[in-house]
Each structure stands twice: as C-alpha cells, then as structure tokens.
Image: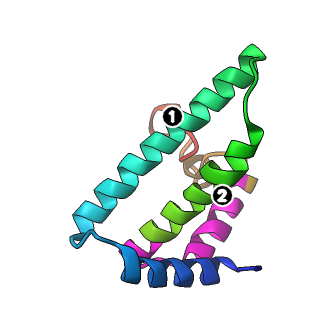
C-alpha cells in the first residue's frame, strides 16, 4: 500500500481515534516523547554495534525504528494540528541551505546567529 504523508497522517488519526488509551494532550505528548527516547536509544545501540564491527540486525531498523519514527511524527503532527507533508517539505528546503537562517537574514554575529536548527 502506497501512502502519501497526508494519507499517513489521516490513517494515524483514525488509528489513534480507535486505539489510543490516552485522553489528555499532555499525556499523549509525554508518551510520544518517551517512545522517541526509547527509539533513539535503540538507534544509538545500532550505531555503536556498527562502529565496533559487532553483529547487528539491520532489519530491525526497517521493521521497527523507521516506521515508529514516522508513526510518532504523524501523531505529533495531528496533536498540534500541522500538516506533516508541509513540515517535511519545509525542512528539506531548510537543509538545502548550508548557512544558518540567521546568516541568510544578515545576522553575521556568530554569537547570535547560532547553528542550524
């Protein structure tokens, strides 16, 4: 089944409506934050094994980590009422520009311009 990001966001909203046991928005955001932390831990462990040359399951990335990142992105987008597709495209555009946006706006002071968001 091929899904656009809009489709993913819609399917996730339908899934959450049927299966979510959390009611308050803060509980949902907290849950997503905790789950993302766990995912980042798994991804860090994968990277560490890879760097050390230890055996690691690349299939685990495709089966669990990558889809869960999309799942939580769609959930968070739905919670705060933003279009995941627009956010994604905007972020891609941000990454095309090698300079931090503050420099592009003319702020050349390194203390206030900062790095890439």
Q: Quadrant of residue 68?
A: bottom right
Residue 79 circle label: none
Element type at mark 2: helix
Q: Residue at x 60, y 77 (%)?
A: 8
The image shows a total of numbered marks equal to 2
- Position of 4 with respect to 76 (left or right) is right
Q: Residues within 10 Å of mark 1 (few under 14, many from 20)?
A: few
Q: Relative to 95, does residue 108 appear above or below in the rendering?
A: above
Q: Disc 2 and disc 1: Cα gap in Å? A: 26 Å
Compare marks 2 and 1 and give the one earlier in the sequence.
1
Residue 109 appearing in the image: no
Residue 94 circle label: 2
Element type at mark 1: helix
Q: Position of residue 35 (x, y in %)?
A: 42, 49
Q: Tell me where the magenta segment starts and ends, as one range.
A: 77-95
Q: Residue at x 65, y 31 (%)?
A: 46
User: Observer-nearest residue: 47 or 93?
Assistant: 47
Q: Nearer the viewer, mark 2 or mark 1?
A: 1
């Amino acid at each position: 089944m091929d899904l656009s990001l809009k489709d993913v966001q819609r399917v996730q909203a339908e899934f959450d409506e049927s299966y979510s046991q959390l009611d308050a928005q803060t509980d949902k955001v907290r849950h997503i934050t905790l789950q993302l932390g766990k995912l980042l831990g798994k991804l860090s462990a994968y990277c560490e094994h890879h760097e050390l040359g230890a055996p690691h399951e690349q299939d685990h990335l495709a089966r669990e980590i990558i889809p869960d990142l999309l799942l939580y992105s769609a959930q968070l987008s739905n919670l705060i009422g933003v279009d995941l597709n627009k956010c994604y495209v905007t972020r891609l555009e941000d990454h095309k520009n090698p300079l931090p946006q503050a420099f592009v706006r003319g702020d050349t002071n390194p203390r206030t311009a900062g790095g890439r968001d």
